[in-house]
Image: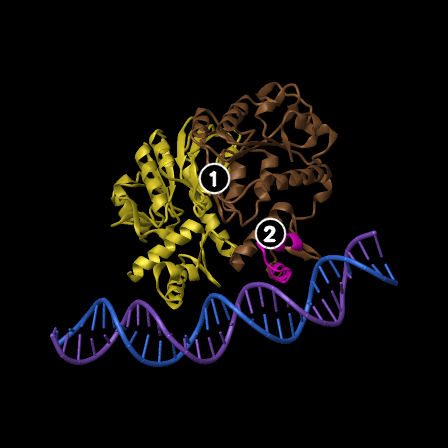
Chain colours: A brown, B yellow, C blue, D purple
Amino acid sequence: MLKKERQAYILHQVHLHNKVLSSSLCDEVNVSEDTIRRDLQELADEGKLIKVHGGALSHSFNLTSSQSQNVYLQNKKQVIARKAASLITNGMFVLTSGGTTIMELARSLSPQLKATFISGSIPVVLEYMHHPNIEVIVIGDKVSKNSKITIGSEAIAKIKQIKPDICFLGTNALDVEHGVTDNDWEVVQLKKAMIEASKKVAFLMISEKINSVQPIKVCGLNKIDILITELETDDPKLKPYAKAGIKIL
Amino acid sequence: MLKKERQAYILHQVHLHNKVLSSSLCDEVNVSEDTIRRDLQELADEGKLIKVHGGALSHSFNLTSSQSQNVYLQNKKQVIARKAASLITNGMFVLTSGGTTIMELARSLSPQLKATFISGSIPVVLEYMHHPNIEVIVIGDKVSKNSKITIGSEAIAKIKQIKPDICFLGTNALDVEHGVTDNDWEVVQLKKAMIEASKKVAFLMISEKINSVQPIKVCGLNKIDILITELETDDPKLKPYAKAGIKIL
DNA sequence: CAAATTCATGCATAAAAACGCAAAAAGCTG
DNA sequence: CAGCTTTTTGCGTTTTTATGCATGAATTTG
């Protein structure tokens, strides 16, 4: 990895998460802490970020107080994203939906990962594009403004033509009886197609949404291969799903 | 292998992967590192890439962020964008490429405008999405990292299926003799398809780029319906193009 | 305040770049 | 085509750059 490339990655991470730890950075890009520190020093000298003990902060890190609730959720999503990322290995074809949790997954991918990502979510695609070794394929069609993903028959047809190794789906509601449910008809159609196309399906969800139901059914529990939450794998909330044969992560 | 040929290969690699290592290059083309270094130096001098220790980076790696120069260009681009926007009326189907000038166009659209925009450029699409009354259609395919647009046969096939009222294209080089030229083969293929598909074609360009030539031809002057620059319509630089029957804006 | 991190500094080393030079290749000219 | 110039390329040598490691100082944290 080239120096400039590494610094670009660092800057990107800073802008993304508003902070970086030098320890995690040197882990991610596989260089010594000294090198990271020197990079941070240089970037700080250029005014690109603020260097602090243990890492660095984004220059636009002033208005944090108003979003305490969001930060709380953000952390949970990062835990989920890291768990999900651990399932992806070099050479894989990965299909993903959109949503903030998937976005977090896109952000926490290792820069060394070489894989192909397919998605119809514009913000998520933009995020994938920043990774040096990732191939990105966009599913085209009309863009739904509120979900920010491409929807429609063209998109579904395109999904049917591929056979990804794994599919990651953000989840709005999960229930033992009703399975996975959602509230946007178009998005549900798309998710159904994604589930059918993929060899393996992983659902990402914040634990708050467990045992809730939405009006439109996506799929039953039997279609879920892996369920990823921020909880420990032996959390009692997850028991019924484990019992249904779902792998908990 | 000829020098020119080698440099073309290097440029291609840079556009493809966003970076090249001089070590791997001299291995691939079987010349000494010195030669590669000299090539990179030349290409860097011509502004075709960014030379760094150990190799080179694509220009899309905008770590340099020279903002003062950009602001200057930005103003010109806003002038161009406003002119272009005046051509769009309610109900139109508009096809656009990517690039910073088109991005500016996307930003300067009236929030009241009700139209359908079609594009393969991810950042531009994201910008369109912010407009309340605009329908957005994404052209799907593999994403090219340096141009940030979708490229490939799928994208071209999709373009051939539509018949937009007008097409706006960012322009890299224009010349009386050679017409519109560009330096990325894949992007050129896409632009050609866009030109063929559209009822009307408008080219957006900064006046600096007038009377310059790039290696790959997009189209002749006869395909240009409208030329939009930041200059006054009676500027002498534009005379030959007006004489060729192009509407100047 | 004591332990554990994290940082700064100098130094060592390997890799890459710059430089000068000379040979080879290509181009030009009469 | 012979002789000249120019361009291109490769090879040492020297310089610069990037990176890791060791040591001691500074800092966070409990």
A61 part of magenta stretch:
no
Pinpoint the chain carrying mark 1: B
Closer-to-camera residue (A34/D5): A34
Q: Which secondary structure, mark 1?
A: helix
On the image, the x and y values in percent for residue A81 come to: 62, 39
Q: Report if residue A84 is visible in the image.
A: yes
Q: Main secondary structure of the magenta part?
A: helix
Q: Nearer the viewer, residue B247 or B152?
A: B152
Relative to B216, is A226 on the left or the right?
right
Kindly check if marks 2 and 1 are in contact, taking CB atoms under 8 A apart as contact.
no
Residue A28, label in figure:
2
Viewer-side residue, B107 vs B122: B122
**Residue B118: x percent and y percent?**
42, 33
What's under tag 2, amino acid-wise? Answer: Glu
Using the image, name the chain to which the residue with label 2 belongs. Answer: A
Q: Quadrant of the N terminus of chain B?
A: bottom left
Q: Is residue A23 magenta?
A: yes
Amino acid type, mark 1: Ile
Mark 2 neighbour class, 10 Å CA radius: few under 14, some 14 to 19, many 20 or more: some
Foreground mark, 2 or 1, reads 2
Figure quadrant of the C terminus of chain B: top left
Question: Range of the magenta residues?
Answer: A22-41
**Secondary-structure class at tag 2:** helix
- Is any atom of residue B208 visible in this view? no
Q: Is residue B64 left or right of residue A206?
A: left
Q: Which residue is mark 1?
A: B122
Residue at image location 54% in from the left, 21% down from the top: A185
**Circle count:** 2
| Position of residue B191 measured from the top left corner of the image (x, y, whole percent) | 34, 40
